[in-house]
Amino acid sequence: MKRGAEKLIEQPRANGCSLTGHHGCGLKNGYVRGFPGAEPHGQLPHIAHNGGLYKRPFNEAFEETPMLVAVLTYVGYGVLTLFGYLRDFLRHWKIERCHNATEREEQKDFVPLYQDFENFYTRNLYMRIRDSWSRPLCSVPGAKVDILERVTHDYNWTFKYTGKVIKGVINMGSYNYLGFAENTGVRKDAVAEVLSQYGSGVCSTRQEMGNLDKHEELETLLARYLGVESALSYGMGFATNSMNIPALVGKGCLILSDELNHASLILGARLSGATIRIFKHNNMQSLEKLLKDAIVHGQPRTRRPWKKILIIVEGIFSMEGSIVRLPEIIALKKKYKSYLYLDEAHSIGALGLNGRGVVDYFGLDPEDVDIMMGTFTKAFGAAGGYIAGKKELIDYLRVHSHSAVYATSLSSPVIEQIIASVKCIMGEDGTTLGKQRIQQLADNIRYFRRRLKEMGFIIYGNEDSPVVPLMLYMPAKIGAFGREMLKRHIAVVVVGFPATPIIESRARFCLSAVLTKEILDIALKEINEVGDLLQLKYSRHRLVPLLDRPFDETTYEETED
């Protein structure tokens, strides 16, 4: 790493905190069974196993997959695989038409562009349920959306639009957590005014002709909102991670990454050239073991100390609905003199009494997080991302971050949307609308999660997370659930392998403050009916807190000399 950023990683604050182990819990396969005091329907008491680091209850549960369901899921994938090989055989002999990209006959002797085996899943499994994704919207992503109707006549290989619009579909999938992605109100008027003054684009980078007064205003406001010294905005959330991590760490550095981190974090870590080791999801024992090993053994072969150790986590994990155990991670960070990179893409605006993310949610000091990252694409209803922290860090990134140096800067209308949203959350717009929406989102989350659990569905994640995964498991039920919900005018997101473990396919609901109780009740009624139709109510009310996910002490290193 360049000398200009050394202040980021010099002289970490002393520990002053200690972690305690888990006491009195019978562990089996990483889950707690028979916890005393657990109520019949999975209502778990707050478990004070963290040495007093938490200032509020932290209830997070992952019900174990029923054995029969797991077996049937594997059988389902096995049957699909067998039929896939049969169809590939028929395609090879021209008995069945082949729709996927293949080499021309005159190119057969060259190195193949397309690996048939690598595309096996796409050809034979994904195509069966491809209609569940990329449905085109033609409205604002509010409480209800309009969807263009499309049909397929070749089993999802191609689609044709019918010209009809499916109107009034309840939106249970957008990241519009606070409802700021809207086409009415003061934010829309402010954006329209800025559009007329500045135009629609900047057409330059920040270091050339693309640094506007609106960028300076946004970053000053962001720093004040987050409680840090400085902030830097970027035009793309994904690139905020993937292009900034390589600027912060490099060869001779160690990255400790949660196993469920987003693809942008994984890409950034790999591009950095640093050694990467993975710890089990939200598992503090796994993380502490890696920290101890890193300090005791140092770099491979040379045994020299690591130049830097960087822990990378997310505030809310977007597939699990879990919230990072930030108080424990900060305590470990201080204890072992490492650094923390926190991705608040899903948590900023959606968590905390003041809507300031997971740091606010736990009542922690923002200075304890070395690099705070977030995006404007969710709670703020805009586009782009930011990095916030010490002034020395931000000054360094302005010069060395590829996203800051080479990428076109945020356009003025997008900046104004962010500014208006942040001011609304902070109450600086002269209203209490921001506070009301934060509270409404929290109420919607708890109500929706409680009702789904009462119906008998297996629901993952933290009770305060706006991301609500409903477990489907079997491959055939992924497409069936999405289609049945759309028939009932409800838009949902379904997710399967390889985005999730092979036996943990799910539907992922994302709640919003603009969803009223009446709308939620309609959605819950339809979800209940589809759950009965597809036999999705797998829960045996054996909810268990996520204390220790299974950990086999196996780590791997992405980059070695």
Image (tube, rainbow, N blue to C red):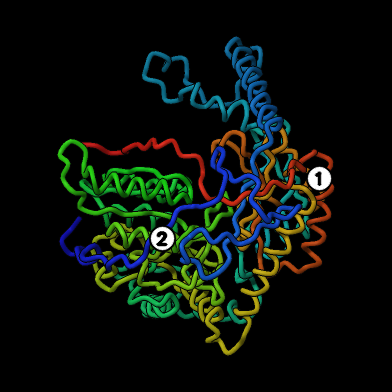
Could you say which disc has been placed on residue 530 in the image?
A: 1
The three-letter code of the residue at mark 1 reads Val
| Separation of residues labelled 1 and 2 (CA atoms) | 37 Å
Name the quadrant containing residue 88: top right
Residue contact at pointers 1 and 2, CB within 8 angstroms: no
Please tell me which residue is depicted at 45% across the width and 44% down the height of the picture: 280
Q: Is mark 1 on a helix, strand or loop?
A: helix
Q: Would you identify the image quadrant in which residue 371 lies?
A: bottom left
Seen from the viewer's position, the closer of residues 528 and 152 is: 528
The residue positioned farthest toward the bottom in the image shown: 430
Residue at image location 66% in from the left, 76% down from the top: 184
* Residue 153 rendering spot, x and y as whole percentages: 73, 32
486 or 266, which is in the foreground?
Answer: 266
- Give the image location of residue 380, x and y in percent: 54, 69
Q: In which quarter of the image is residue 79?
A: top right
- 1 to 190, vertically: above or below: above
Q: Please report the residue visible at 57 percent of the width from the left and 59 percent of the height from the top.
A: 47
Look at the image and tell me in which quarter the N terminus lies: bottom left
Residue 269 appears in the rendering: yes
Q: How crowded is mark 2: few (under 14 residues within 10 Å), some or many (20 or more)?
A: many
Quadrant including the C terminus: top left
| 79 versus 22 height, above or below | above
Q: Nearer the viewer, mark 1 or mark 2?
A: 2
Q: Which residue lies furthest to the front in this view?
A: 24
Q: How many labels does the image show?
A: 2
Whichever of labels 1 and 2 marks the residue nearer the N terminus, that label is 2
Depth order, front residue of 49/134:
49
Residue 203 can be seen in this image = no
Q: Callout 2: helix, strand or loop?
A: strand
The residue that appears at 62% across and 43% down in the rendered structure is 495
Placement of 80 over or under 181, stated as above or below: above
Residue that numbered label 2 is attached to: 342
